Image (cartoon, rainbow, N blue to C red):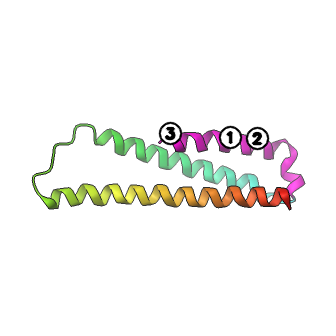
Amino acid sequence: MSHLKYIEKELINLITICNQGFNTKLEDSTVVKRFEKKQNENQTLLNALIKYSNSRTNIAECEDTACDMVYITEHESYRRSYLYHLDKYRRLKDDFFNKIHG
């Protein structure tokens, strides 16, 4: 979750840079919109992980493997969502910096 909070700060900085006229230098008006969309996605994922984390604070230990599998499957789903989000964010950021360096 701390990584998503850092990404939030980084996105705020990137959006600010784009809104201060840098967006026109890139000759791509979609850059700031893509950062804003990613900012919303980041916040949605962070909220989901916080809710998930809070729901797991008073969990009892499972008695059987079926119970374990429910928790493992849920955890794996959140883990995959997080990794997918990171990959998409890194690609967006790489695209932005590639445009800067032309």
Tell me where residue 77 sits by quadrant.
bottom left
Q: Give whichever of discs 3 and 1 has the lower sequence position.
A: 3
For label 2, the SS is: helix
Real-space Cα separation, disc 3 to disc 1, in angstroms: 16 Å
Residue 73, numbered circle: none
* Circle nearer the viewer, 2 or 3: 3
Q: How many labels does the image show?
A: 3
Q: Quadrant of the C terminus?
A: bottom right
Q: Verify CB contact (< 8 Å) between mark 2 and mark 1.
A: yes
Relative horizontal placement of residue 44, taking residue 19 as reference (left or right): left
Q: Which amino acid type is shown beneath numbered disc 1?
A: Ile
Q: Give whichever of discs 2 and 3 has the lower sequence position.
A: 3
For residue 10: magenta?
A: yes
**Which residue position is annotated with label 3?**
2
**Which residue position is annotated with label 1?**
12
Relative horizontal placement of residue 43, taking residue 18 as reference (left or right): left
**Which residue position is annotated with label 2?**
16
Residue 96's spot in the image, x, y percent?
75, 57
Relative horizontal placement of residue 46, taking residue 72 as reference (left or right): right
The range drawn in magenta is: 1-26
Q: Which amino acid type is shown beneath numbered disc 2?
A: Thr
Residue 21's spot in the image, x, y percent?
87, 45
Residue 18's spot in the image, x, y percent?
79, 47
Tell me where residue 53 sits by quadrant.
top left
For label 1, the crowd category at 10 Å Cα-Cα, with few meaning under 14, some 14 to 19 and many 20 or more, is some
Residue 26's spot in the image, x, y percent?
86, 56
Real-space Cα separation, disc 2 to disc 1, in angstroms: 6 Å
